[in-house]
Amino acid sequence: MPIRAADLANNAFGLTPFGVHIGDHGIDGHPGWDIEYVEGSTIYAAAVGTVQSVLSRDGEVVIQLAHTLNGREAYRTIYGVRAVANGIVAGAAVTQGQPLGVVSSYTRTIGTVTVTYAFTHFQLDDFSANSGLTNMQAVSPEAFLNAEARAIFEVMWRDAVYSQEIVEPFSNSPRDVTFPMTRAWTQQTGDLAPRLEVTRASATATGFTYTMRDSSGASIETGTIELEILARPMPAIDFVAANGTRRRGVFSIESGTMQLVYGTPGATRVLTLAGASTYTTQR
């Protein structure tokens, strides 16, 4: 991993996973991981390799490392940094865990909240791969993690939160998808709607629509979803029905499992997941 456990942060999102259709990657899916750091932290080389290039781009420095397998250049890792570490120049050999530079910080508005946070885009290219519309060699780093890296990843993934998670909840999402995209969540425990279907209309849509269904599959409510992922102490979700009534709730998603609480129309928002209903979804 390009990050140490002590440098993990979650002021904004924690981790944006591979394949999710978000921001500039709305059409072809995110080609790597956006990893959030404590501001001022160091980014490290994920594996032994050679510096392929050090290039300035859009106010950031992009470092590319080449990695060989059986004597050939088989992989490349890519890192964005604010300042480059000493000795990181094209052609230099690097060791696993060697400092590459200092992470960049940003101040942005996410939903209605303005937040300052630091992150790098970490990308793994496998030169035997060929998929997607852009970054066609990009693959999910998850399958390449050793035990130590896996432990760090699991902490990041457990706490990750991003708005598209409600329709693309997995750490490795397919890049080639069709919109409108609908995700069906089926209740396993609790007393809320037995089935919840959430739809994102297009790759650029920032909102979602929903249909609540009973146990027979009949529609019992439709409307739009409003998310505030930076709400504290829990990410907030509002179900605004077609008749204008609002159910206020909180939620947490980790891969194919969602914990969800929402109240009756007009009720005050509950701020914990105590007594939450559990929903699951399939890939």
Image (cartoon, rainbow, N blue to C red):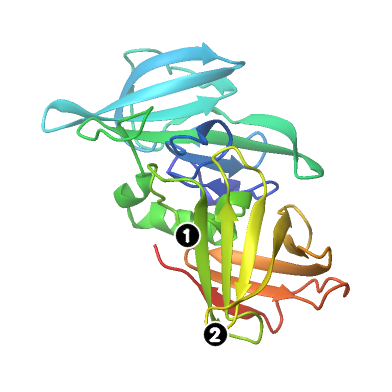
Of 221 and 74, the residue lying toward us = 221
Q: Which mark is residue 215?
A: 2
Determine crowd level at label 2: few under 14, some 14-19, many 20+ residues with C-alpha closer than 10 A. Answer: few
**Residue drawn 63% across the image and 80% down it:** 277
Inspect this view and state whether residue 162 appears: no
Q: Name the spot of residue 105 as percent of width and height, x first.
A: 67, 31
Of 222 and 191, the residue lying toward us = 222
Three-letter code for the amino acid on which mark 1 is drawn: Glu
Report which residue position mark 1 lands on. 154
Query: Is 235 above or below relative to 67?
Result: below
Image quadrant assignment for residue 35 = top right
Image quadrant assignment for residue 40 = top right
What quarter of the picture does the N terminus occupy?
top left
Q: Are marks 2 and 1 in contact (CB under 8 Å)?
A: no
Three-letter code for the amino acid on which mark 2 is drawn: Ser
**Horizontally, is 280 left or right of 102 in the view?**
left
Q: Name the spot of residue 36 as percent of width and height, x first.
A: 59, 43
Query: Is 267 above or below relative to 170?
Result: below
**Residue drawn 51% across the image and 22% down it:** 85
**Residue drawn 81% across the image and 65% down it:** 243
Inspect this view and state whether residue 150 appears: yes
Q: Name the spot of residue 98 as percent of width and height, x first.
A: 42, 32
Give the residue furthest to the left. Answer: 70
- Say which element carries label 1: helix
**Residue drawn 58% across the image and 20% down it:** 83
- Say which element carries label 2: loop
Q: Name the spot of residue 152 as percent of width and height, x first.
A: 47, 54
Give the foreground label among 2 and 1: 2
Which of the marked residues, 2 or 1, is nearer the chain's N terminus?
1
What quarter of the picture does the C terminus occupy?
bottom left
Query: Is 174 above or below relative to 135?
Result: below
